[in-house]
Image: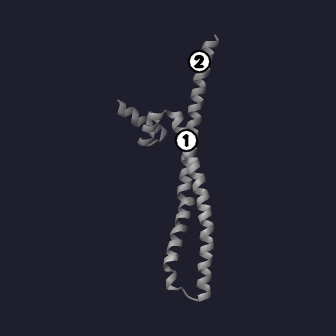
């Protein structure tokens, strides 16, 4: 019975088992509020970091390209720096093309759920007030 309710809730809200467990421990409103603030700060921090690293990578890439052009050939001593720079460019591209959109979708989903929880709480409070007012 409990397992069926768990699976039903997991399918309805499209939440992982880990998320559902945290919701049960913390409650819906604190969980969504906590996740929204955590993901927002993570997004801002990593955005700023990737911009700074991207600027330095652009400068380094321009320097290496200038060395290759001035030397007229690809020097064997540039293999390691080119490999490291390539890895950093791949990480930056993966952040902006894969990870960041996933993070934005998750953030939007949590905001929608938080709005739903707030509306439910507001409706409960209005019903209580209406009963008291009578």
Relative height, residue 128 to residue 90 (above, below):
above
Q: Which residue appears at 53% of the width and 62% of the height?
A: 94
Find residue 22 and report its image quarter: top left
Find residue 126 and report its image quarter: top right
> For the view shown, which residue lies furthest in the top direction?
134
- Quarter of the figure that contains the C terminus: top right
> For the view shown, which residue lies furthest in the bottom direction?
72
User: Residue 75: x and y, percent?
Assistant: 52, 86
Disc 2 and disc 1 in contact, CB within 8 angstroms: no
Task: Using the numbered discs, state the Cα–Cα distance from disc 2 to disc 1 in whole angstroms.
Answer: 27 Å
Q: Which residue appears at 57% of the width and 36% of the height?
A: 114
Residue under label 1? 110
Instruction: Tell me the element at label 1.
Output: helix
Residue under label 2? 128
- Quarter of the figure that contains the N terminus: top left
Relative height, residue 76 to residue 87 (above, below):
below
Q: Nearer the viewer, residue 12 or 79?
A: 79
40 relative to 77 in the view: left or right:
right
Q: Residues within 10 Å of mark 2 (few under 14, many from 20)?
A: few
């Amino acid at each position: 019975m409990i397992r069926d309710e768990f699976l039903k809730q997991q399918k309805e809200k499209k939440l992982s088992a880990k998320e559902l467990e945290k919701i049960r421990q913390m409650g819906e409103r604190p969980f969504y509020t906590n996740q929204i603030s955590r993901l927002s700060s993570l997004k801002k921090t990593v955005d700023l970091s990737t911009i700074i690293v991207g600027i330095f990578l652009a400068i380094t890439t321009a320097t290496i390209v200038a060395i290759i052009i001035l030397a007229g050939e690809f020097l064997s001593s540039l293999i390691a720096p080119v490999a490291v720079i390539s890895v950093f460019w791949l990480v930056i591209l993966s952040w902006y093309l894969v990870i960041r959109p996933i993070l934005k979708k998750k953030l939007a989903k949590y905001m929608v759920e938080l709005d739903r929880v707030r509306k439910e709480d507001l409706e409960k409070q209005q019903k209580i007030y209406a009963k008291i007012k009578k």
